[in-house]
Image (cartoon, rainbow, N blue to C red):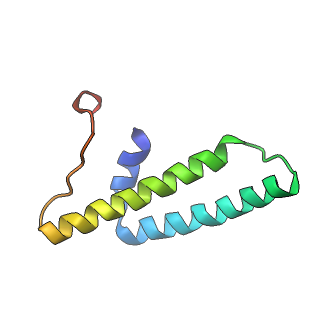
């Protein structure tokens, strides 16, 4: 899960900027699909949606960690892949 590790290194402002870029890209891709034009990469819609979800998850983890006053708890991460 390299994508999540890369996102963890970004600041909150960078995460917000990245999310805005991805949402704009997603709107454009959905417009292409709606008009009947096939996007160059059909997996890009799925990839963008998942990256946005990862960003939202990371921001929520940071928010909860700041409320607790500690490091963000990352549940479900498999230790052998780190």
33 with respect to 49 (left or right): right
Q: Residue at x 58, y 46 (%)?
A: 47
Give how far across and how far down residue 74 sits, in percent: 24, 48
Location of the N terminus by quadrant is: top left
Give how far across and how far down residue 8 sits, in percent: 33, 54
Q: Outermost residue, front direction? A: 34
Q: Outermost residue, top direction? A: 80
The image shows residue 55, relative to residue 41, as above or below, that is below
Q: Outermost residue, right direction? A: 36
Q: Residue at x 21, y 57 (%)?
A: 72
Q: Nearer the viewer, residue 12 or 72?
A: 72
The image shows residue 54, relative to residue 66, as above or below, that is above
13 with respect to 44 (left or right): left
Query: Based on the displayed image, in which of its 4 quarters is residue 26 positioned?
Result: bottom right
Location of the C terminus by quadrant is: top left
Give how far across and how far down residue 12 sits, in percent: 36, 69
Q: Residue at x 83, y 46 (%)?
A: 38
Give how far across and how far down residue 48 sits, in percent: 58, 52
Query: Based on the displayed image, in which of its 4 quarters is residue 64 positioned?
Result: bottom left
């Amino acid at each position: 899960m390299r994508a999540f590790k890369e996102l963890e290194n970004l600041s909150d402002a960078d995460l917000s900027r990245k999310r805005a870029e991805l949402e704009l890209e997603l709107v454009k891709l959905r417009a292409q699909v709606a008009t009947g034009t096939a996007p160059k990469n059909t997996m890009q819609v799925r990839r963008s949606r998942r990256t946005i979800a990862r960003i939202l998850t990371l921001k929520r983890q940071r928010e909860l960690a700041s409320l607790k006053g500690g490091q963000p708890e990352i549940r479900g991460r498999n230790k052998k892949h780190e």
